[in-house]
Image (cartoon, grey):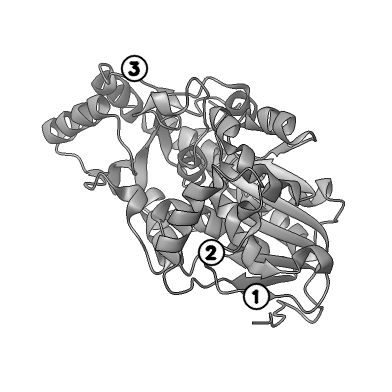
Amino acid sequence: MNSTPKSNGATEPRICMPSFSGFARNVFRAGLYEAQDVLTSCDDVELIPLESSKGFALKSRWMQRLVYHDRSERLALLNPGIKPVRLVRDYDLFVVVCPLWSDVWYANAVEGWRDHCRQSICWIDELWSHDIRGLQRWLPILSKFDYVFVGIAGTHAALSSALGRQCYETLGAVDALRFSPYPQVPSRVVDFYSVGRKVESIHRRLLEWADENRLFYLYDTLDNSGDRATSNYRQHRDLYANIAKRSRFFAVAPGKANAPEGGRGQVDVGFRYFEGAAAGAVLVGQTPDCDAFRQNFDWPHAVIETQPDGSDTFETLSKVAGDPEQLLAIGSRNAEQALRRHDWVYRWIDMLNIAGLKPSPAMEARVTRLTELADLAKLHREKLVGAPR
């Protein structure tokens, strides 16, 4: 089918961006679908909702196995079972947002994008350096893009070497307007909020802490949260944000903390750090030992550190909870910094700048609104707790 231009304003869309949300509905993808929504809301974007064909799941799995053994390197350039879309107009930029590296394959369903788009960006969130060696047959897809960004700190260097040209790093972020507790600050009725994967030793300690102190510890009870599907990711993000900004403490840990062999020594700054901070909660857990975290979370008490085995959980939480002013100061500073630095719009502006495109007026307006709320968070903290702590 041909694409039908859809613009947010009177101008023709300058960005073409396919979306996989109609068939790839895993909960872990919702954060990057949110990132797409932020771009669509503040730029002239034609969002192309891709649809899977009959038998897509079986066909894509079968083709994916064959690609690893395809010396011709042609299979990776075929459509894996998505209903094809043919572009009929020109754009300044083609953008593909991929939670997983294998999602790049879906871009093959958009026929003629190289002919109709002046430049192109591929953004892959989860790609570990040690996986690149096994992806040689997939590199022809990435070679089609002018700019490649990766979300795990450090992977861009290994991918640059494999592709023979510069790749870029862009960390996660959050829709800080959705997650922010400002301007109408809600009550913190959830004492501790833990999302998704849990480190079992810490989880047990938190259960004991909540039981002994009659507190509300909210956590996922399903082990397969990454495989659960949601038909409406926006409702999922709204619910998540509304709980997070009503939580005092928020659990954080580096990526694959409960399966460290998965990263093989590489440290990932997961989305939870950005989401919990934006919600104005106190982040409790482990600090990722990497420059990316130190550069992006460089304010006091960004994370309240606990031992990986949870042995000091009681003592740490009791100490912070026993000082209400400190609790408020930490949370409001987290929210302020997220508003100033970690909204998705900042990531989009950085990527567009690298591609030589200026940010849109609506992007600049969003930054202004984020700054206003950040100033409000700072003022709120200063009124209640006085000098910075």
What residue appears at the point 43 percent right and 74 percent down from the top-left corner?
A: 54
Q: CA distance from mark 1 to mark 2?
A: 13 Å
Q: Earlier in the sequence, mark 2 or mark 3?
A: 2
Query: Residue 304: in sight, yes or no?
Result: yes
Q: CA distance from mark 2 to mark 3?
A: 39 Å
Q: Tell me, for residue 307, which label it has, or none.
A: 3
Query: Does residue 368 appear to the left or right of 25 in the view shown?
Result: right
- Within 10 Å of disc 2 (Cα), the crowding (few <14, some 14-19, many 20+) is many
Residue type at numbered disc 1 = Val
Q: Tell me, for residue 53, which label it has, or none.
A: none
Residue type at numbered disc 2 = Phe
- Within 10 Å of disc 3 (Cα), the crowding (few <14, some 14-19, many 20+) is few
Q: Tell me, for residue 85, which label it has, or none.
A: 1
Which residue has dot 2 on it? 20
Q: CA distance from mark 3 to mark 1?
A: 51 Å
What residue appears at the point 50 percent right and 42 percent down from the top-left corner?
A: 271
Q: Position of residue 356 (x, y in %)?
A: 87, 51
The quarter holding residue 157 reads: top right
